[in-house]
Amino acid sequence: MSFKVGVQLHPQVGTVDELRAAWKAADALGADSIWIWDHFFPLYGNPDANHYEAYTLLSAMAVDTEHAHIGALVTCNSYRNPQLLADMARTIDLLSHGRFVLGIGSGWFERDYTEYGYEFGTAGSRLADFATALPKIADRLGALVPPPDGDVPILIGGAGEKVTLRLVAEYADAWNSFGPPDNFAHKNAVLDEWCEKQGRSPKEIERTVAIQPNEVDNLDAYLAAGAEHFIVMVGAPYDLGPLESLIAARG
C-alpha cells in the first residue's frame, strides 16, 4: 500500500538557522510534506525557551524548499481574521508555487490566548468561531487577485466526534489526528460516518496521522487503521533519522 510521509519541525528551543537547515534537509531527503505548529510559546520543556511565529517561518520555508508541501499542523483559527488568513495562505502558496496546505483547527493552548490578548472562551465557543470562519476562508480564497497558484487544500486537525469531524466532512481535503492506532481507527470510522451524512465520499479526504519518532516501526497498524500520510514530530536539534526511516519504508 502506498503512503505519504512528512515531518513536523517544532519551532521551539533551537535557532531560526537550525530550523531552516532542517526543512531544507527534509526537502532534499524527499519528504512529501514539512510542517511547523502555530503557537507562541513552547509546548513542552522550558516554558521560556526560544520560540518563533508560524506564518513568518512558513514564508521563508516556501522559498527555501522546492518539492514538499508545507503548512502549519495546525493553524489556530482564533489568532487571525479569517479573511486575512486566507490572504496569507494565498501569498505563501504563490511563494511556494502551489505547495501550501492550510492546516487549521479551533485552538486549545490557553497561554497563547491569555498572553497575546485573545479571548480564550470555551471549547464550544472556539468551535463555533471555527465553523463560522471556514466558509469565509473558502470565499476569500476564491476572490483574491491573483488567485493561489495551487488549490490550497484545507486540512483540519482534531478528533471531536460531534463537531470537529463533522466540519472535516463538510469542508476539509485532509484530516489530521493522533494515535494510538486503535484510537485513530475509531476516529477514522466516525469521520466516514459524517461523510455519509454529508453526502461526501470518504475517499475525498486524505487521512494524516502525527506520530512520535518511536512509532515509525508501527506503520502497518496505522495503515490498517486507515492512515495514508505519516507525519513524524521532531524537536530541536532536529534529528531527521525517523523521517529517513519513513522515506525508506515508503520506497
Image (cartoon, rainbow, N blue to C red):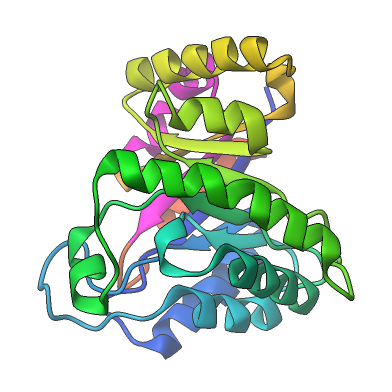
Task: Find out whether residue 217 is within the magenta segment.
Answer: yes
Which region shows up in magenta? 215-234
Residue nearer the viewer, 37 or 197 = 197
- Identified at 66% across, 47% down, the residue is 135
Asked which quadrant contains residue 216, the reply is: top left
Q: Is residue 148 above or below residue 153?
A: below
Report the quarter where the N terminus lies: top right
Report the quarter where the C terminus lies: top right
Image-based side of 109 in relation to 93, left or right? left
Q: Is residue 18 above or below residue 5?
A: below
Task: Give the image location of residue 140, x and y in percent.
Answer: 74, 62
Task: Give the image location of residue 220, x and y in percent.
Answer: 48, 20
Residue nearer the viewer, 98 or 31 = 98
- Identified at 19% across, 70% down, the residue is 114
Task: Find out whether residue 56 is within the magenta segment.
Answer: no
- Identified at 58% across, 63% down, the residue is 82
Task: Give the image location of residue 112, x and y in percent.
Answer: 25, 68
Image-based side of 197 in relation to 52, left or right? right
Asked which quadrant contains residue 199, the reply is: top right
Q: Identify the residue at the far right of this view.
A: 146
- Identified at 24% across, 58% down, the residue is 120
Asked which quadrant contains residue 113, the reply is: bottom left
Q: Is residue 125 above or below residue 20?
A: above
Q: Is residue 250 above or below residue 18?
A: above
Task: Give the image location of residue 204, x and y in percent.
Answer: 74, 27
Residue nearer the viewer, 175 or 123 = 123
